[in-house]
Amino acid sequence: MNINSLKFCVIGGGIGGLAAALALRVRGAQVTVFEQASELTEVGAGLQISANGMSVLRALGVADDKPAFGQKSFGTVLRDYRKGRVISRVPSPAAGPTYYFHRADLLDLLHKAALRAGVEICFGSRVTEVRKHPGEAEIVLESGERLRAECAIAADGGRSVIRPILNGPETPAFTHQVAWRATIPWSHPDQTPRAALTMGPGRHVVTYPLRDQSLMNVVAIEERSDWREEGWWQEGHPEDLRARFADFGGEVGDILAQVEQVNIWALFLRPVAAKWQNGRLALLGDAAHPTLPFMAQGACLALEDAWCLARAFEAQSGVVKALAAYESVRKSRAQKVVATAGSNARNFHLSGPMRLAAQAALMALGPRLAQRYDWIYSYDPTG
């Protein structure tokens, strides 16, 4: 299908939205992105982009084998919480290494690539509604302005305001897990940098370096029920973080001791959307399949979506068929990855005899542990 004459409106200027806009634009579409923030800011922290996501960044011309701002990973080390004892070392996936990005850096790369390609990006533009009409979609802005396009793509995140148009109102389920996120200055470079997953009863901490190892990213997860604020921008107290992880020793204990600013948010579970599209409007990224962070696949799934969406428009005749094909290709994979991430939450937080048995199994598996997730990392939507 030739999409040179088609106009697309993308709602949300995050990683998935910008990648989709770029993928559509390089195929000839006219694309406008509506982002409610007034500008790109230094928000968020670290992201892990594994081989499946990197394949999309390479195909879009945003990254190569030595991507700007990307820190190559040499695998993951699994540690016990008390003294940081190494349980197992997991090598990089067979499909290729993971790269660690600061979210702001990856957004900047995608933003600049989209502008160079001719994507129009409108900041300070909040979309409140999308209406389906015969042959087009109507986009309604908070300002009252109304625009028309052949297709609208909602990439407005896990708390999407557009998703209910397709799926009705939904009540997310609180997982009884809370996440802390911080970055700290780091001055201990490693020739073979790795992520570290430190596991304890009811809690775990993930750390990995960013920006040429000048920063260390910290994500700490704990089971609790007294914090239910979902937004990740809520400010937490470093002293509270340290108190809740006071028995975590070794390197991760030293890292937590250096945290000066930290955000905290409760993790809520939303299902993969039952309905992804209606022939004029489609969901993408977390708006379609919000995932818990325990496989580090949120950004990667959004990148996969972006490429598969654009490819569907190449392969199909008409918007209706293209969106149906996109949903068909993406839905089952998203469901499987999201389910895998959910199961890992239990595996990371074992206690008592189950924890000791799990550690013995991890020691025995060693390098073979990565193979169980080959189906995630070896997927190449651009192939």
Image (cartoon, helix red, strand yellow):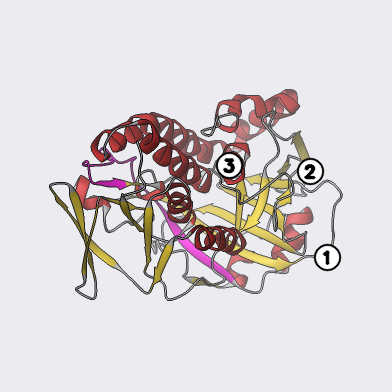
Going by the image, does 198 lie left or right of 235?
right
Going by the image, does 322 lie left or right of 95?
left
Check disc 2 and report its element: helix, strand or loop: loop
Tag 2: amino acid: Arg
Query: What residue did someone put label 3 on?
Result: 59
Instruction: Classify 10 Å Cα crowding around label 2: few (below 14), some (14-19), many (20 and above).
Output: some
Instruction: Classify 10 Å Cα crowding around label 3: few (below 14), some (14-19), many (20 and above).
Output: some
Tag 3: amino acid: Ala
Cα gap from disc 2 to disc 3, whole angstroms: 40 Å
Q: Earlier in the sequence, mark 1 or mark 2?
A: 2
Check disc 1 and report its element: helix, strand or loop: loop
Residue 274: in magenta span: yes
Residue at 43% across, 36% down: 311
Q: The N terminus appears in which quarter of the rendering?
A: top left
Q: Which segment did they paint magenta?
A: 262-282
Residue 187 tag number: 1
Tag 1: amino acid: Ser
Cα gap from disc 3 to disc 1, whole angstroms: 34 Å
User: From the viewer's perspective, is the residue at label 1 or at label 2 nearer?
Assistant: 1
The x, y position of residue 91, in whole percent, is 75, 34
Residue 32 tag number: none
Q: Are marks 3 and 1 in contact (CB under 8 Å)?
A: no
Q: The C terminus appears in which quarter of the rendering?
A: top right
Residue closer to the observer: 185 or 309: 309
The x, y position of residue 356, in whole percent, is 67, 32
The x, y position of residue 380, in whole percent, is 56, 31
Task: In the rendered view, tell whether residue 374 sits above or below residue 307.
Answer: above
Instruction: Classify 10 Å Cα crowding around label 1: few (below 14), some (14-19), many (20 and above).
Output: few
Q: Quadrant of residue 65?
A: top right
Residue 296: in magenta span: no
